[in-house]
Image (cartoon, grey):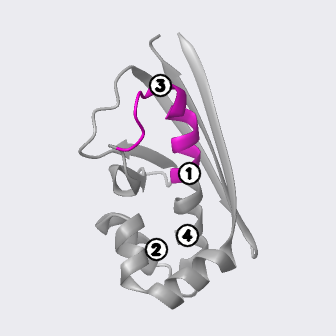
C-alpha cells in the first residue's frame, strides 16, 4: 500500500480573469459539462467554484504524478469533480483508467480570494 498526497491553492481572480478573457475556450478546455453546470448554478459565487475545481484537479495531478509513467495521456477533462448526495466533493476519472487506486479522498475550500484543495490517494502498491 502506498499513500500519495497532493495540494493546491489558486487565486480566484486568476481563474475569473481567465474566464472573462478567454470565455468558453478556457472553460471547455478545463472543465467537464457537469462541472460547468454546477459552477454556473452558483451565480455570483461561480468563480469560487470554478477555482476550487481547478485547484482540485491540480491536487489530483500532483497526487498521481509518481504513479503514472507518462502524464500526457491524462488531461484536465479526464478528472471530474462532483459532489455526492451530502455535498461532499468526489473525484471521478473519465476516459482514463487510473490503475491501482484503492481509495481517494478530497477536501476543497474557498474564501473571497483563494480556493484550495487537498487530495489523498491510497494505491494498492
Give the Cα separation between the discs numbered 3 and 2. Answer: 30 Å
Q: Which of marks 2 and 1 precedes in the sequence? A: 2
Mark 4 nearby-residue class (10 Å; few <14, some 14–19, many ≥20): many
Q: Which residue is mark 4?
A: 49
Residue 116 in the image: above or below residue 47: above
Find out whether the residues at labels 1 and 2 contact each other: C-beta distance under 8 Å. no
Image quadrant of residue 25? bottom left
Task: Of the two numbered discs 2 and 4 on the same chain, state the one appearing first in sequence.
Answer: 2
Residue at 52% from the left image edge and 34% from the top image edge: 65
Kindly report the distance in space between the C-alpha atoms of the residues bearing marks 2 and 4: 6 Å
Query: Label 4, label 1: how many angstroms apart (C-alpha)?
Result: 14 Å
Q: Nearer the viewer, residue 31 or 18?
A: 18
User: 82 or 113, which is in the foreground?
Assistant: 113
Answer with left or right where residue 106 lies relative to residue 8.
Answer: left
Secondary structure at numbered mark 2: helix
Which sits earlier in the primary sequence, circle 4 or circle 3? 4
Q: Earlier in the sequence, mark 3 or mark 2?
A: 2
Q: Residues within 10 Å of mark 3 (few under 14, many from 20)?
A: some
For the record, the magenta segment spans 57-72
Provide the residue designation for mark 1: 58
Residue that numbered label 2 is attached to: 39
Residue 79 badge = none
Rendered view: 54 above or below 121: below
Q: Give me the C-alpha separation between circle 3 and circle 1.
A: 15 Å
Assess whether mark 1 and mark 3 are in contact (beta carbons under 8 angstroms).
Answer: no
Classify mark 3: helix, strand or loop.
helix
Mark 4–mark 1 CB contact (< 8 Å) = no
Label the magenta part by its dominant secondary structure. Answer: helix
Mark 2 touches mark 4? (CB < 8 Å)? yes
* Residue annotated with mark 3: 67
Amino acid at each position: 500500500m502506498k499513500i500519495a498526497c497532493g495540494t493546491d491553492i489558486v487565486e480566484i481572480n486568476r481563474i475569473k480573469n481567465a474566464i472573462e478573457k478567454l470565455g468558453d475556450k478556457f472553460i471547455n478546455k478545463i472543465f467537464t459539462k457537469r462541472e460547468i453546470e454546477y459552477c454556473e448554478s452558483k451565480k455570483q459565487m461561480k468563480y469560487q467554484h470554478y477555482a476550487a475545481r481547478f485547484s482540485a484537479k491540480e491536487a489530483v495531478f500532483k497526487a498521481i504524478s509518481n504513479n503514472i509513467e507518462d502524464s500526457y495521456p491524462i488531461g484536465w477533462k479526464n478528472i471530474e469533480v462532483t459532489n455526492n448526495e451530502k455535498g461532499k466533493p468526489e473525484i471521478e476519472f473519465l476516459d482514463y483508467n487510473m490503475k491501482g487506486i484503492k481509495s481517494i479522498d478530497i477536501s476543497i475550500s474557498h474564501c473571497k480570494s483563494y480556493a484550495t484543495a487537498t487530495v489523498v490517494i491510497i494505491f494498492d502498491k
